[in-house]
Image: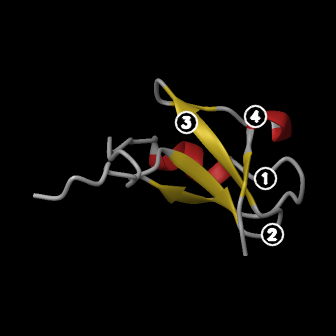
Amino acid sequence: MSDKPDTAVPTFEVDVDPRLLEVLVCPVTHGPLELDRARGELISKGAKLAYPIRDGVPIMLPEEARELSE
């Protein structure tokens, strides 16, 4: 065992209705989104943003999104 704190992202697999994923687009680029189940986010590669999913509901507000690093 290591004495270092675990800095890994907590895994809490989320599920989103596949039909919802088909119609959702990034509000900034109007491009496609990818589901990151492990982080509970919808990823917009075009906008370099990750939109959170809270209680199964995608929060599609740019001001709530996390900026992705290169």
Say what amino acid the circle numbered 3 marks.
Ile
Does the CB distance between marks 2 and 1 fall below 8 Å? Answer: yes
Q: Give the residue type at disc 4.
A: Glu
- Answer left or right for 27 relative to 54: right
Which is more N-terminal, label 3 or label 4? 3
- Seen at 36% across and 45% down, the residue is 10
Q: CA distance from mark 2 to mark 3?
A: 19 Å
Q: What residue is drawn where x is 60% and y is 51%? A: 42
Please name which of the two marks, 1 or 4, marks the residue nearer to the observer: 4
Q: CA distance from mark 2 to mark 1?
A: 9 Å
Q: Is residue 40 left or right of residue 6?
A: right
Q: Residue furthest right?
A: 28
**Which circle marks residue 46 in the picture?**
2
Give the x, y percent position of residue 39. Answer: 46, 49
The CA distance from mark 1 to mark 4 is: 13 Å
Instruction: Determine the secondary structure under disc 4.
Output: helix
Q: Mark 2 or mark 1, which has the lower sequence index?
A: 1
Mark 1: few/some/many CA within 10 Å (<14, 14-19, 20+)? many
| Residue farthest along the bottom direction in this orientation | 70
Is 32 positioned to the left or the right of 28 in the image? Answer: left
Labelled pair 3, 1 in contact (Cβ < 8 Å): no
Circle 3 sits on which residue? Answer: 53
Per the image, the residue denoted by label 4 is: 64
Is residue 35 positioned above or below 11 on the image?
A: below
Say which residue appears at 41% left-offset and 51% top-offset: 9
Counting from the top left corner in percent of width and height, residue 53 is at: 55, 36
Mark 3–mark 1 distance (CA, rounded to whole Å): 14 Å
Mark number displayed over residue 26: 1
